[in-house]
Amino acid sequence: MLDLVIIGGGPAGLTAGIYAQRYMLKTVLLEKQLVGGQVQLSDVIENWPGIKSISGMELSERFEDHAKSLGLKIEYGEVTGIDERDGKRVVKTTDGEIETRTVIVATGARPRELGVPGEREFRGKGVSYCGTCDGPLFRGKDVLVVGGGDTAIKEAIYLSKLVNRLYVVHRRDQLRAEKILQERAFSIENIEFKWSSLLTRIEGKDGVERAIIHNKKTGKDEAIEVEGVFIFVGIVPNTEFVDVEKDEWGFIKTNQRMETSREGIFAAGDCRATPLRQITTAVGDGAIAAYMAEQYVARMG
Amino acid sequence: MLDLVIIGGGPAGLTAGIYAQRYMLKTVLLEKQLVGGQVQLSDVIENWPGIKSISGMELSERFEDHAKSLGLKIEYGEVTGIDERDGKRVVKTTDGEIETRTVIVATGARPRELGVPGEREFRGKGVSYCGTCDGPLFRGKDVLVVGGGDTAIKEAIYLSKLVNRLYVVHRRDQLRAEKILQERAFSIENIEFKWSSLLTRIEGKDGVERAIIHNKKTGKDEAIEVEGVFIFVGIVPNTEFVDVEKDEWGFIKTNQRMETSREGIFAAGDCRATPLRQITTAVGDGAIAAYMAEQYVARMG
């Protein structure tokens, strides 16, 4: 039987793995798709302390290498639920069951859909949730970015270098992103801001041809000719599979010890109800969750 | 007037500084002695995600460089208190006063004294709280390490390479340190463990000559001839200067938003009441504290 199953291989899960290996817990990290999590999709990271600038891909690889160098076992599979049996946890996956004393849920989050007509229809045909993944497909074309937070503005800055003209559509009259990102974005000539506006519809034939936006102040609609629509309007936690106490958006509630409402189950990183979601906060969560798992295992004997 | 004063230049303070600069808060970081904090004193760090092994000195320098590259202003001075005036914070230092909207207390902690006869008398004459600082003075000599946690065992492993014979005196019959550290220490030939034992007295003339230890199980005392005594029995938070709610050991109580009991004052890192004190947790705290400070400043206008 295992001491610990870590679900999710982003910064929180990998850091939990690094700590768990140092505590010599018998651990497996389960990842659904690609180790690295959302960080992997980030073009450039400038706020990971000690490194002025690094690609998300490279930072992810460094985390993964570190965890593997300590012998962390990484397996691939999708978790469908966590049961209890004789005071132990049973992690149910699409491939079977795994018995473990403790579990750390570090499944992160995924981009939130806007929910407008055309969004699903043109997904992969002009509608995207990842600039670094799909940006190169829009070289020299006109695109539109929806959102005003850190991710939206970072992605707009990145995309502006590839595309011809870029529109940022934001529902408020100012951005929420870090000021340093705002200043950069405002200084870029081919970015145009559409303030107090909502994207209401995406139209086209084989691919995106135009976006319809609605200005809340003037009440007027406008059609903007673009071939790409990038949507960055928040995230949804990947927590549907686990039955623990959550907040109204589905983020897992924990105390400062990363303990969830169920014994032996901890949560860490973006899937957790927390005031800020960053790589820095994910690694802090991961370390604490692994430490508390170790303490739990030691107590249980 | 400033938006933010960060007190302390360890990983928590420097990360808060990196984030504050990106939020474009008008910020000053105040440091009493040396930027870097306790990390600087660490011989080798192996659990900072993405770097398999690095000296504390070098990691500190990378954090400092990163913060400075973003324009963080670092000043030297000792803080004696934090007052309120007209809804603002007034940071009192030995050099005067600084007005600011918000404060982040990231002052860390210092080694705890054991409180035995001879400890103060021989401080700097054989009694030390830092292996990397003072270890080289004991090359080829016999020394004693008190403690059984991560720091004690890491320092014992480091010192064992320099000294002739090394005794680890621990009050319990097993270590509390990470298992990976325990295994390493147990495999080192010139380390001898004195279990269930207390250091009760340090004796000598011009410097340390011997340590008296008491075995709690046998009830017997033993004199061990050593020229160095390294004490690692926990930490004391550097929080005496600030009047906020603290736990019984003086660590500052906060919620998950790093808010203390006083408005506009946040705490981050080792000085905070938290289940685990690591570089990973310090940077998470620092990021959240800076974010909440930014939110506070934005709300106040």
Image: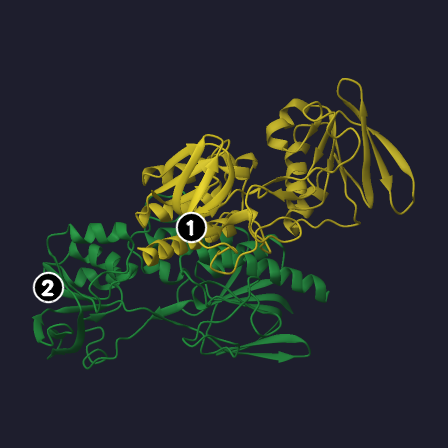
Chain colours: A yellow, B green
Residue nearest the observer in this picture, A231 or B22? A231
The image quarter containing residue B131 is bottom left
The chain letter under disc 1 is: B
Check the picture and name the quadrant holding the N terminus of chain B. Answer: bottom right
Query: Where in the figure is residue A105, as x and y percent of width and height?
Result: 49, 46
Can you say whether B264 is above or below B66 in the image? below
* Residue B217 seen in the current view: yes
Tell me residue A138's x, y (percent): 68, 24
Q: Position of residue A125 (x, y in %)?
A: 70, 22
What's the CA distance linking mark 1 and mark 2?
35 Å
Query: Chain ID for label 2?
Result: B
Q: Are marks 1 and 2 in contact (CB under 8 Å)?
A: no
> Considering the image in quadrants, where does the C terminus of chain B appear?
bottom right
Q: Which of B173 and A35 lies nearest the eye of the viewer?
A: B173
Looking at the image, residue B44 sits to the left or right of residue B85; the answer is left
Residues packed near mark 2 inside 10 Å, few (<14), some (14 to 19) or many (20 plus): many
Left or right, residue A35 beside residue B155: right
Q: Is B189 left or right of A243, judged from the image as shown?
A: left
Amino acid carrying mark 2 in the image? Asp
Q: Is residue B60 visible?
A: no
Give the camera-side residue of A268 and A239.
Answer: A239
Q: Which residue is mark 1?
A: B62
What element does badge 2 sit on?
strand
- Label 1 neighbourhood size at 10 Å, few (<14), some (14-19), many (20+)? some
Q: Residue at x 35, y 58 (%)?
A: B40
Quarter-of-image position of residue B214:
bottom left
Q: Which element carries disc 1, helix, strand or loop?
A: helix
Amino acid of disc 1: Arg
The residue identified by callout 2 is B142
